[in-house]
C-alpha cells in the first residue's frame, strides 16, 4: 500500500523571493506581494502571510492594495523560476527521503515513503523531519501523510493542522469532511457543483456516480476515487539527466524471487559499469519495480561511503527482495544511483605491502539498511567538562575532527541517561561515601578515588555560574565500580544541593 506525503508551500513564491535576495530582502514582518511582469491589469498573484493578515487576497488590484497598505513591497512574479525551484526541492527530497518523489506544481511536492519510513524512525518522524528542515530553510510548509496522493494533497491544503498523519485505512472519514475544492477539479467544475448545492467531498461521494458523470464527465468520479484511495495514482519520480540509471523491460511479467534476484544482479553490473565510466561511487541506490497494473514498488539502499562493488550492491538489494510484492507480475525494473560521489580506483593490496586499515563500511551498510540509519552511530568527543555534554552521536563513517577524549581521569563505559539519586553516608567536605544505596541495594565502599571537581559551563548558562560537582570512583565489596558525584563543593550550599547521584558504571 502506498503511503504518500504531500508537502504544501502556501507562500512559496514570496519565501523563495526572500531566500534569493537574502539580506536585501524585505523584512519578514513587512507585507510582500507579487504581480505579473506583463499585462495591463496588474493583480496580486502571490502574497506572504503578513499581507494576508492585513486583508489582501489573490486577485486584488495592486493599485488598490497599495492604497490600502502603506509601505507594501511589490515584486515581479516569476512562475518559471518557481517551477525550477520546486523541481530542486523535489530532488532534495528524493536524495533524503524516498525513491518516489515528484513536484506537485504549483505549490508542493509529493513523496511516497512506503518502505523507506523505517530508515528515518517511522512515519511521524519523517513528517517532523521534513517540516523541520523546511523551516530551517525559511520555507513555510504543511504536510500530510495518507494512503493516496489525492488524500494527502487534500489534507495538506485544507486541514487546519500543519502536520497530519492518517493511519492506513482510516482516511475516508477525514477526507469526506473536507470541502470539494480539495479534489483538484477545475474552478468551472467546482462552481457548477456548488450551484447544485454540493459542499463537501462526502456530499459528492454519496451521490450516484452516473448522475455526476453525465453532467460533469468522468473527471469528478476519478478524483473522488483518488482522494479515497480507491484508484491508484502513480508517482513518476523526478530524475536528473546526469543520474546513472539502467532499466530492464521484460517481455513477460516476472514474479519469482529467484528471477528478481537474477535481474537485480544484471542491473547492478550495468550500473556499476556506468559509475566506473564517470568515476563515481553510489551512496544511495533505488530499485524501482513497475508492475503490470502500473503500480510501483521501490527499494532503497544507502551506503556510508561511495561504493562501486557489484557483489556488495547486489547482496544489499537482494536482501530486500522479500519487501517487493510482485502483484500480478513485474514488467519493468529500473536501478538508479540517486546519490553518487567521486570515487577513485583503489590499489589492490599484496603481500609485499602492509595491510591497510580494516574496512568496516560494508558491515555498517549492511546493519544500517536492516536496522535503519539512526540505529548505527559512533560517539565523538565534545569540548565540555560536563559529562552528559561531552559527547555527540556522529555517522559511523564520519571523518575524525581531531578532538580527543579526556584522559586525565577515567570515564565509565556506561553513562546513565540521567543521574540517579542515591543515599549515602560521607564526611564533608571531601571524603567519599562509606556506603551508598542504589536501586534498593546497599553497597559498602571498599575503595575510592577522587574527588574530580567539575565546574558548570558558566559562560553558556547563567544558572551554572557557581555550580560544582565532585566525582568519585568507588568500588564495592563485590568488585563492582561506580561513578558517583556530590552536587556542590561540600561547603557552600550555593554551589549545589549536596545530594549524591550515581552517574555511570565502569566495565
Image (cartoon, helix red, strand yellow):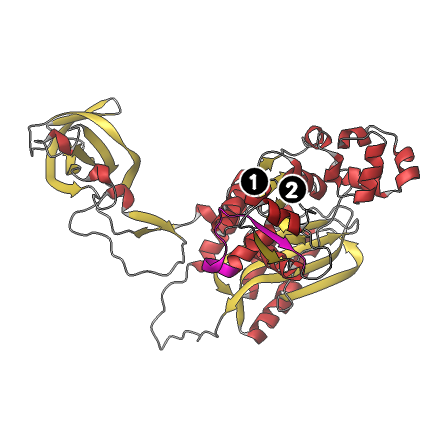
Task: Name the residue at 28% across, 39% down.
Answer: 415
Please give the residue where the numbered disc 1 appears in the rendered image.
123
Q: Is mark 2 on a helix, strand or loop?
A: loop
Which picture quadrant has residue 236?
bottom right
Q: Where is residue 140 in the image (x, y as percent from the top left)?
A: 55, 46
Residues marked 2 and 1 touching at CB (< 8 Å) = yes
Relative to 388, residue 237 above or below: below
**Residues in magenta?**
21-36
Q: Position of residue 212 (x, y in %)?
A: 88, 35
Specify the farthest residue to the bottom: 352
- Magenta span includes 136: no
The numbered disc on residue 293 is none
Which picture quadrant has residue 501?
top left
Q: Would you say 365 lies left or right of 417 here? A: right
- Spatial distance from mark 2 to mark 1, Cα to Cα? 9 Å
Please give the residue where the numbered disc 2 appears in the rendered image.
3
Which picture quadrant has residue 74?
bottom right
Q: Where is residue 326 in the image (x, y as percent from the top left)?
A: 72, 48
Which quadrant does the C terminus fall into? top left
Circle 1 packing at 10 Å, graded few (<14), some (14-19), many (20+), is many
Q: Would you say 76 lies left or right of 410 here? A: right
Using the image as rendered, state which of residue 239 and residue 159 is in the foreground: 159
Amino acid at each position: 500500500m502506498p503511503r504518500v506525503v504531500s508537502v504544501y508551500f502556501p507562500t512559496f513564491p514570496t519565501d523563495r523571493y526572500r531566500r534569493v535576495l537574502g539580506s536585501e530582502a524585505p523584512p519578514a514582518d513587512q507585507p510582500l506581494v507579487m504581480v505579473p511582469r506583463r499585462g495591463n491589469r496588474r493583480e496580486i498573484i502571490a502574497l506572504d502571510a503578513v499581507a494576508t493578515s492585513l486583508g489582501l487576497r489573490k486577485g486584488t488590484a495592486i493599485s488598490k492594495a497599495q492604497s490600502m497598505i502603506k509601505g507594501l513591497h511589490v515584486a515581479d512574479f516569476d512562475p518559471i523560476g518557481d517551477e525550477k525551484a520546486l523541481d530542486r526541492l523535489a530532488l532534495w527530497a528524493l536524495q533524503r527521503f524516498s525513491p518516489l518523489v515528484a513536484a506537485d506544481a504549483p505549490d508542493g511536492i509529493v513523496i511516497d515513503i512506503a518502505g523507506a519510513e523505517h530508515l528515518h524512525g517511522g512515519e511521524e518522524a519523517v513528517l517532523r523531519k521534513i517540516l523541520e528542515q523546511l523551516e530551517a530553510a525559511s520555507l513555510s510548509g504543511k504536510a500530510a501523510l495518507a494512503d493516496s496522493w489525492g488524500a494527502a494533497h487534500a489534507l495538506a491544503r485544507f486541514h487546519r493542522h500543519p502536520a497530519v498523519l492518517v493511519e492506513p485505512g482510516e482516511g475516508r472519514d477525514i477526507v469526506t469532511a473536507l470541502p470539494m475544492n480539495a479534489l483538484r477539479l477545475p474552478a468551472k467544475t467546482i462552481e457548477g457543483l456548488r450551484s447544485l448545492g454540493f459542499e463537501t467531498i462526502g456530499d459528492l461521494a454519496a451521490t450516484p456516480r452516473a448522475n455526476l458523470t453525465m453532467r460533469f464527465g468522468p473527471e469528478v468520479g476519478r478524483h473522488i476515487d483518488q482522494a479515497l484511495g480507491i484508484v491508484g495514482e502513480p508517482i513518476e519520480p523526478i530524475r536528473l539527466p546526469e543520474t546513472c540509471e539502467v532499466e530492464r523491460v521484460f517481455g513477460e511479467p516476472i514474479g519469482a524471487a529467484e528471477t528478481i534476484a537474477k535481474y537485480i544482479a544484471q542491473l547492478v553490473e550495468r550500473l556499476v559499469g556506468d559509475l566506473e565510466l564517470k568515476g563515481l561511487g553510489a551512496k544511495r541506490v533505488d530499485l524501482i519495480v513497475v508492475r503490470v497494473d502500473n503500480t510501483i514498488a521501490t527499494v532503497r539502499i544507502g551506503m556510508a561511503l561511495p561504493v562501486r562493488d557489484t557483489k556488495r550492491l547486489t547482496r544489499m538489494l537482494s536482501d530486500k527482495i522479500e519487501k517487493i510484492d510482485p502483484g500480478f507480475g513485474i514488467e519493468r525494473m529500473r536501478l538508479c544511483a540517486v546519490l553518487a560521489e567521486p570515487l577513485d580506483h583503489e590499489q589492490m593490496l599484496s603481500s609485499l605491502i602492509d595491510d591497510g586499515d580494516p574496512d568496516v563500511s560494508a558491515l555498517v551498510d549492511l546493519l544500517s539498511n536492516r536496522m535503519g540509519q539512526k540505529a548505527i552511530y559512533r560517539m565523538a568527543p565534545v569540548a565540555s567538562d560536563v559529562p552528559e555534554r561531552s559527547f555527540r552521536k556522529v555517522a559511523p563513517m564520519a571523518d575524525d575532527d581531531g578532538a580527543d577524549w579526556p584522559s586525565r581521569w577515567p570515564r565509565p563505559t556506561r553513562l546513565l541517561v540521567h543521574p540517579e539519586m542515591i543515599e549515602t553516608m560521607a564526611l564533608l567536605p571531601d571524603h567519599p561515601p562509606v556506603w551508598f544505596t542504589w536501586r534498593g541495594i546497599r553497597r559498602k565502599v571498599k575503595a575510592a578515588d577522587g574527588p574530580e571537581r567539575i565546574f558548570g559551563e558558566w559562560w553558556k548558562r547563567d544558572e551554572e555560574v557557581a555550580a560544582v560537582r565532585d566525582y568519585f570512583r568507588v568500588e564495592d565489596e563485590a568488585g563492582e565500580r561506580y561513578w558517583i558525584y556530590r552536587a556542590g563543593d561540600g561547603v557552600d550550599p550555593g554551589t549545589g544541593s549536596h545530594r549524591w547521584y550515581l552517574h555511570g558504571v565502569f566495565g
